[in-house]
Image (cartoon, helix red, strand yellow):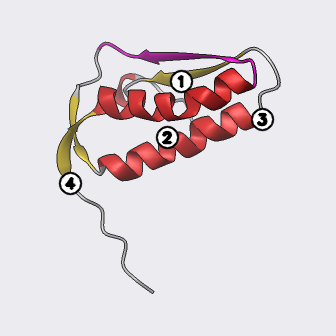
Amino acid sequence: AGKLIIEEKPFSLQKCIVEAVDIITPEVRRKGLDIALSVAEEMPDTVIGDQMRLRQVLINLIGNAVKFTEGGKVEVRVWDMSEIDVVH
């Protein structure tokens, strides 16, 4: 019914990712898992987009990974897809 409005504002990508991981960390610890985060060096710190929506997507993805992981660790890796050759 309503239109989805995507904001386009500068924000810290690193901070957004860390906030999402921090929100999930208590559940990670409760399950006895570890969590690892790595962000490629070439990733810009400041990006333009909808920080709140990105953070929610990250929380959902990381939360699902934690939910379906029985042991070991969950790894969150962020890299620039334009740097990767994809073979079709």
Residue at mark 4:
8
Image quarter where the C terminus lies is top right
Amino acid of disc 2 = Leu
Tell me the distance, in whole angstroms, between the alpha carbons under discs 4 and 1: 24 Å
Point out residue 13 in the picture as x, y percentages from the top left corner: 30, 32
Residue at mark 2:
58
Tell me the distance, in whole angstroms, between the alpha carbons under discs 1 and 2: 9 Å
Question: Would you say residue 33 sits in the magenta stretch?
Answer: yes
Amino acid of disc 3 = Phe
Tell me the distance, in whole angstroms, between the alpha carbons under discs 2 and 3: 15 Å
Q: Secondary structure at mark 2?
A: helix
Instruction: For residue 81, say whether it is visible.
Output: no
What range of the chain is rendered magenta? Answer: 31-41
Q: Residue at x 60, y 28 (%)?
A: 26
**Is 60 on the left-hand or right-hand side of 19?**
right
Residues tagged 1 and 2 counted as in contact (Cβ below 8 A)? yes
Q: Earlier in the sequence, mark 3 or mark 4?
A: 4
Q: Earlier in the sequence, mark 2 or mark 3?
A: 2
Tell me the distance, in whole angstroms, between the alpha carbons under discs 1 and 3: 15 Å
Residue 76: mark in rendering:
1
Point out residue 6 in the picture as x, y percentages from the top left corner: 30, 62
